[in-house]
Amino acid sequence: MKNQEIVTMLREIADLLEQQKANPFRVNAYRRAAMTIEEMDCPITEVIHRNGYTGLTDLPGIGEGIARSIVEFAATGHMSRLESLRAGSDPIAIFQKIPGVGVKLSHRIVEILHIDTLEALEVAAHNGRLIKVPGFSENKVNMVNAWLAQVLGRGRQIEKGTTGVVEPPVKLLLYIDRQYRDKSGLKALPKIAPKRFNPSGKKWLPIMHKSKDEWHFTALFSNTARAHQLGHTRDWVIIYFYDKKHHEGQHTVVTETKGPLIGRRVVRGREDECMELYFDRVG
């Protein structure tokens, strides 16, 4: 892995975010990181091997999220943040590289949890969602956790007494989901042309960037193979989020088709919290 490879990828992320009219803070963060790496007089791999994840975050302009992307690429050859922005990522190919997971469990992760990056899988492993996927025992989840910690460097602190990494509350995610779907219905959002499942190159996918409660969000309808197969490309909403401390992640919001929440919008993998929220509203 050469420094210029990372520089090129970080600048492409910045360019794609800028084209999508993302928050300038986020765009400039990737450009500053690219400039830092470009000016280094030693290979970035030496920094990783010598000091690991913290060696990257000690560099000027490189926060936690960008450091995780660099470590991920060094370990796997994938930079899921870039692949997601290109709308051309293949999560099955990414997840099956994890020892002990394989193709079958990779499909289950995507179909049940609606996630497509290693970072999102890390969140699911920590907050109890992954163990609910058939085939994942406590030992297998611990193994995945250990592998992800090594690959991603996991600089994020897991607070004692909590079940996961820092994430926006469910109420806020549902608010962003409602805003996105309302504005999309009014045709008040810019559109992008995804590379997958779009042979004509048409700009059809509405995209929304919004900041609220110290979080920055990007929302768009799901353009995954599964969403197309089930006809849910106008129902499933992918919400990417990050804050100024570079906590990052994503969630999928869907209309529930079964159980007590049927017909309601729920954050996939956080159904219990949605239940509490809706119950409290009723009460």
Image (cartoon, helix red, strand yellow):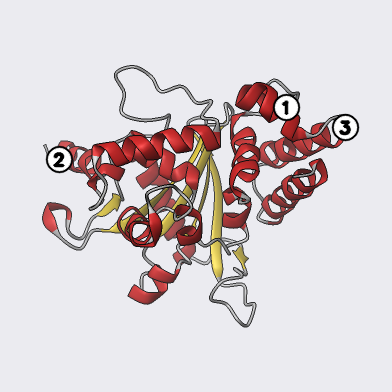
Between disc 2 and disc 3, whose residue precedes?
3
Q: Is residue 224 visible?
A: yes
- The quarter of the rendered structure image containing the C terminus is top left
From this view, report whether residue 166 is shown above or below residue 129.
Answer: above
The image's mark for residue 187 is: none
Q: Amino acid at mark 3?
A: Glu
Between disc 1 and disc 2, whose residue precedes?
1
223 vs 186, nearest the viewer: 223
Tell me which residue sits at (48%, 67%) in the image. Answer: 223
- The quarter of the rendered structure image containing the N terminus is top right
The local crowd at label 1, few if under 14, some if 14 to 19, many if 20 or more residues have their Cα within 10 Å, is some
Q: Position of residue 190 (x, y in %)?
A: 61, 62
From this view, report whether residue 72 is shown above or below residue 161.
Answer: below
147 vs 35, nearest the viewer: 147
Q: How many marks?
A: 3
Tell me which residue sits at (69%, 20%) in the image. Answer: 58
Label 2 SS: helix
Q: Which residue is mark 2?
A: 279
Q: CA distance from mark 1 to mark 3?
A: 14 Å
Q: Which residue is mark 3?
A: 39
Between disc 1 and disc 3, whose residue precedes?
3
Q: Amino acid at mark 2?
A: Phe
**Nearer to us: label 1 or label 3:** 1
In this image, 232 relative to 61: left or right?
left
**Nearer to us: label 2 or label 3:** 3
Q: Amino acid at mark 1?
A: Val
Q: Which residue is mark 1?
A: 47
